[in-house]
């Protein structure tokens, strides 16, 4: 599978024009792991127009209704979506579950799910309601974990929904409950012995 993985630092250093030019050259791209960006529609539109075999998307960061709407509008045939360790609004999750008719796999493990209460304050959701669970049950795979005993979920709460990846193990960001998105050691620049020699306490 033709896959692209981009880090927060790398993505933020690329101009909008640079990203669009890169996507135009990714005709065979099937899977993308990317951080949250301020204006996602142009990325999703670029993928739709240039990457006809695109089917897997992983978001690391924040996933709101704007992002969800861009995905459902431009990538309606998306088959795999992972939001692992992301801050996700319930409106965005409902949009995905209701609109992506071809979606087969969804991962919301260790996400900080929330909605805005009537008083304007953010309310964290620890359990999905029956309606969301019913929609998710139609998927081939649905991964979710919002447990107070889970280490990854605890990290999400500590970091208020936006993980400070630099605080944690080098392998942590590469893992995923979805097998095709679990990078294991892919993208690792150094071996374990070298990393021990170059690590900073």
Image (cartoon, grey):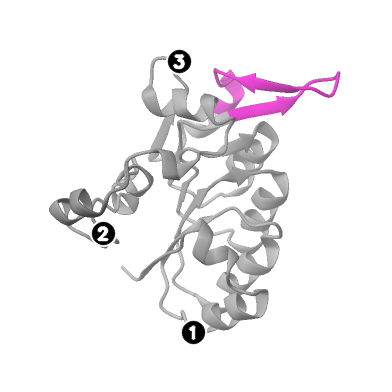
Instruction: Point out residue 186 in the picture as x, y percentages from the top left corner.
Output: 26, 59
The residue where tag 1 is placed is 25
Sort mark 3 into few (<14), some (14-19) or many (20+) by Cα contacts within 10 Å.
few
Determine if the magenta segment contains residue 191. Answer: no
Q: Residue at x 45, y 54 (%)?
A: 79
Q: CA distance from mark 3 to mark 2?
A: 30 Å
Q: Quadrant of the N terminus?
A: bottom left
Q: Residue at x 55, y 18 (%)?
A: 126
Q: Residue at x 40, y 29 (%)?
A: 152
Vertical arrangement, residue 85 with respect to residue 121, above or below: below
Residue nearest the viewer, comparing 57 with 94: 57
Name, please, the residue furthest toward the left.
Answer: 193
- Identify the element where label 3 is drawn: loop
Q: Residue at x 42, y 73 (%)?
A: 29
Is 197 situated left or right of 128 in this image? Answer: left
Where are the magenta residues, as a range? Answer: 113-133
The disc placed on residue 148 is 3
Instruction: Point out residue 45 in the picture as x, y percentages from the top left corner.
Output: 64, 70
Sort mark 1 into few (<14), some (14-19) or many (20+) by Cα contacts within 10 Å.
few
Vertical arrangement, residue 141 with respect to residue 33, above or below: above
The residue where tag 2 is placed is 186
Vertical arrangement, residue 86 with respect to residue 189, above or below: above
């Amino acid at each position: 599978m033709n896959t692209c993985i981009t880090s927060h630092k790398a993505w933020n250093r690329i101009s909008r024009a640079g990203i669009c030019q890169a996507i135009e050259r990714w005709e065979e791209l099937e899977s993308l792991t990317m951080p949250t960006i301020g204006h996602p529609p142009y990325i999703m539109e670029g993928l739709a127009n240039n990457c006809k075999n695109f089917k897997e998307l992983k978001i690391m960061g924040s996933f709101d209704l704007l992002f969800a709407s861009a995905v459902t509008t431009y990538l309606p045939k998306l088959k795999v979506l992972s939001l692992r360790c992301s801050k996700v609004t319930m409106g965005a999750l409902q949009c995905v579950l209701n609109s992506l008719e071809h979606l087969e796999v969804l991962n919301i493990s260790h996400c900080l799910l929330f909605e805005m209460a009537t008083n304007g304050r953010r309310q964290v959701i620890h359990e999905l309601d029956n309606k969301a669970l019913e929609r998710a049950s139609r998927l081939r795979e649905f991964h979710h974990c919002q447990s107070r005993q889970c280490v990854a979920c605890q990290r999400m709460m500590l970091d208020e929904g936006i993980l400070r990846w630099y605080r944690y193990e080098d392998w942590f960001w590469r893992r995923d409950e979805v097998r095709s998105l679990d990078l294991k050691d892919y993208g690792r620049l150094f071996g374990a012995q070298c990393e021990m020699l170059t690590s900073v306490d």
